[in-house]
Image: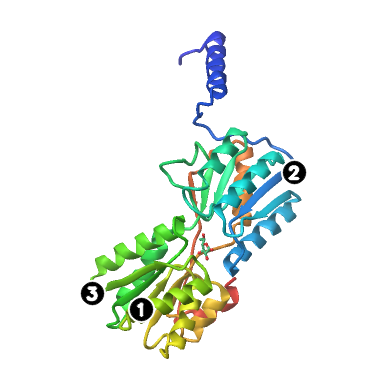
Amino acid sequence: MTTISRRTLMLAATAIGALAVAGVAIAEVPKLAQKDTYKVGFAQTESNNPWRIAQTNSMKAEAEKLGYQLVYTDAAGSAAKQVADVNSMIAQGVDVIFLAPREEKPLIPAVMAAKKAGIPVILLDRSVDPSLAKAGEDYLTFIGSNFVEEGKRVAEWLAKNANGKSKIIELEGTTGSSPANDRKKGFDEAIQAAGGFEIVASQTGDFARDKGRQVAEALLQAHPDADIIYAHNDEMAIGAIAALEAAGKVPGKDVLVLSIDGGKEAVQLVVDGKIAAVVECNPRFGPKAFETMQRYAKGEAIEPNLVNEDKFYDASNAAAELANAY
Ligand code: GYE
């Protein structure tokens, strides 16, 4: 074993200090002290759907259970506002920031500002561009679903159950968000590999019900022979069902609709036969988020990626699962 002299250690410490003063990034997530209670920030991206509301409720319930103070912000669908929200949390001196970054690139400055201020960041449900910020260096970890896998599971269901239907309209989530990027990647690659399918159009509906309806309406007019709609979330699928019915088509019969999220309304639509299958995206983050923060404060090494388990609903189990859906 090599012994390091006190002088060497002091020199190293001084050098690190000088780097920090010079503004050179240090490859380490800020530490978190062990305390009885914490002031914790949660920067939500928007609240326009049941998934977001379930996630917020889960975070609030867990903070309350633990007796932690929660500074909650809602960016109302604006990445610029979300950056400002994080800056305000930094100014308020929170101990930790839970961030659900709306888009992969625009939230990088927020992650870096928190790091510079000595506040550890835990990313929830969406991630940031991995070439610009890294788990275990710039932020502690990402907690969420495997979105590539979610898209792949939709494609695999179709490969087995499409029954000759083959022309796909894809409704993408928010442009530049990690779930939209990865749900597209996972689906497109797997559907290509399955063979016999064609994605006739793929366009963003911004994860929103009304935008999904409008985009589906336009795409159905341009591609009247489309017989499958794959939506990156329930909200857009529900919008697409409205567009189909307005066009005189029967969802579930003329056109198969598939989505991701698995909220109660969507699972009910599976029971009703209007949605063919849904991959769940689990929104119940509270327990895992706060437990991860406590493990970090204790000095445990945290994995860079903590993956949530997702269920799958189709006609075979939707009725039985309905009561458990959020
Ligand atoms: O699918 C969607 C929400 O980031 C995983 O964002 C989340 C997605 C979810 O608005 O409904």
Q: Are marks 3 and 2 in contact (CB under 8 Å)?
A: no
Give the percent coordinates (x, y) of residue 131.
Answer: 40, 42
Which of the two discs, 3 and 2, sits closer to the camera? 3
Would you call the spot at circle 2 few (<14 residues within 10 Å), some (14-19), or many (20 or more)?
Answer: few
Please identify the quarter of the rendering in which residue 86 is found: top right
Whichever of labels 2 and 1 marks the residue nearer the N terminus, that label is: 2
- Residue drawn at point x = 59 percent, y = 73 percent: 324
Which of the two discs, 2 and 1, sits closer to the camera? 1
Would you call the spot at circle 1 few (<14 residues within 10 Å), some (14-19), or many (20 or more)?
Answer: many
Quadrant (top left/top right/bottom left/bottom right) for the N terminus: top left
**Disc 2: which residue:** 37
Compared with 240, 288 (above or below) is above
Tell me which amino acid carries mark 3: Gly
**Disc 3: which residue:** 196
Give the percent coordinates (x, y) of residue 173.
Answer: 46, 64
Name the disc covering residue 228, or none: 1
Whichever of labels 3 and 2 marks the residue nearer the N terminus, that label is: 2
Please identify the quarter of the rendering in which residue 200 is found: bottom left
Compared with 233, 319 (above or below) is below
State whether residue 300 appears in this view: no
Compared with 155, 92 (above or below) is above
Tell me which amino acid carries mark 1: Ile
Quadrant (top left/top right/bottom left/bottom right) for the C terminus: bottom right
Question: What is the total number of numbered labels drawn onto the structure image?
Answer: 3
Q: Nearer the viewer, residue 298 or 205?
A: 205
Please identify the quarter of the rendering in which residue 38 is found: top right
